[in-house]
Amino acid sequence: MNYRPDFCPRLRSIDVLPFRWEGQEVFLLRDPFGFTEKTLIVPKILGPVLAALDGTHTLRDLQVIASRTLGQLVMLEDIEKFINTLDQHYFLEGHRFETLKREILAAFTESPLRPPSHAGKAYPADPAELKNFLADILARWPKREGFSPRALIAPHIDLNLGARGFAAAYQGLSWPEGARVVVLGTGHFLESPLSVLDKDFETPLGTVPCDREFIAELLEREPEARGDILGHRQEHAIEFQVIFLKYLLGDFRLVPILLASPTLETRAFLDRIASVLAELADQHTFFVAGVDFCHLGLRYGDPKPAGEAEKQKALLFDHELLRQILALNADGLYQTLLEDAENHKVCGFGPLYFLLQLLKNRPLTGKILHQEVVDFGPGSIVSFAAAALYDK
């Protein structure tokens, strides 16, 4: 493709991950949204060029930046080749990527099914292997009988790293056959405040039907609740909960809802949807929030590595959040996390706040089941928890 010298390319919101490859410092470029499986390795020395792909620098600007960085003249045609490579990988904003996105959205919209995007990657795709995998995780928590809370808080972190958290949340779960389960998940890729998906979830253990009648009634009253359905396509926060629920319950009806973190502008909208959902929910409706808590360290933009001191800090902060959750204190949780957004970076803000808004008029009591913090890459940590809310 020919580019004008005044063309200003903009890199999409992709992962740019530093690592060593064949003894060299490089960046791995990949698409966390899953529009493309392609990856690209770029020498780390070209970091300033990548940083300048912000839609304000022309190709000639990039030529100057590359020449200064490398200490030698870089030809404009070399810049054009680099930009074309990025475009061929769908890493640039523009016509090529938008065409791909429209095609993927159309195919996803037309299908009645949501395929398992993480089967064979985060967990086994073979049914027998998956059953053994989940049984091994659940065995990490003491057996319990008749565990039937109204609502569960569970992790969505890597299933192996978060095994004890998942086990604490799901061991012995025994909701009634045919229960309606509203699963709230963090929308890591969501481009709307909230999104309800009316698609059945495929899993290696069988297809989980969504509660289409329930969802249709919600959408009839609040059409905007459909939101950015494409955010569900690659999201793991709900998918991880669904495989445990399918394994343990067998027959249940799913209401999958992704949420972004609330803002001053979106809070009223979320409150309105929560109010309608609370009105529609009956005694056969149960709730799961698939969330993680603090994200600290180099991976998450902090200036220094996270160590033992940060781990203790995260656990204390999480305990305060859990105290507010068990008290159904939606306002307190909202204020704490809104003011703290840049410090502890709690990615479960949206689902947790929405859950409390849903349940605020119910007589419930709660219990913290588990708290944990784990290393998640060099100098980085993630915390998570399991908790339950019971009918009084």
Image (tube, rainbow, N blue to C red):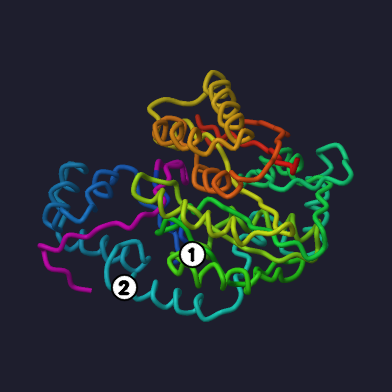
Quick one: label 2, few (<14), some, or many (20+) residues within 10 Å?
A: some
Question: In the rendered image, which quarter contains the C terminus?
Answer: top right
- What secondary structure is the stretch in magenta mostly built from? loop
As displayed, is residue 379 above or below residue 232? above
Tell me, yes or no, whether the highlighted magenta stretch contains residue 245: no
Q: Position of residue 213 (x, y in %)?
A: 63, 74
Residue 70, image quadrant:
top left
Q: Are marks 2 and 1 in contact (CB under 8 Å)?
A: no
Quick one: label 1, few (<14), some, or many (20+) residues within 10 Å?
A: few
As displayed, is residue 143 above or below residue 86? above
Observer-nearest of 290 and 175: 175
Task: Indicate the amino acid at tag 2.
Answer: Arg
Observer-nearest of 93 and 203: 203
Observer-nearest of 8 and 253: 253
Residue marked by disc 1: 37
Residue at position x 77%, y 66% in the image:
205
SS class, disc 1: loop
Residue at position x 57%, y 52% in the image:
185
SS class, disc 2: helix
Q: Position of residue 17 (x, y in %)?
A: 43, 45
As displayed, is residue 17 above or below residue 106? above
Task: Indicate the amino acid at tag 1.
Answer: Glu
Residue marked by disc 2: 96
Q: Position of residue 282 (x, y in %)?
A: 69, 59
Q: What segment carries the magenta color?
A: 1-25
**Residue farthest along the top direction in this orientation:** 309
Question: In the rendered image, which quarter contains the N terminus?
Answer: bottom left
Residue 167, image quadrant:
top right
Give the Cα separation between the discs numbered 2 and 1. Answer: 15 Å
Q: Earlier in the sequence, mark 2 or mark 1?
A: 1
Residue at position x 15%, y 57% in the image:
75
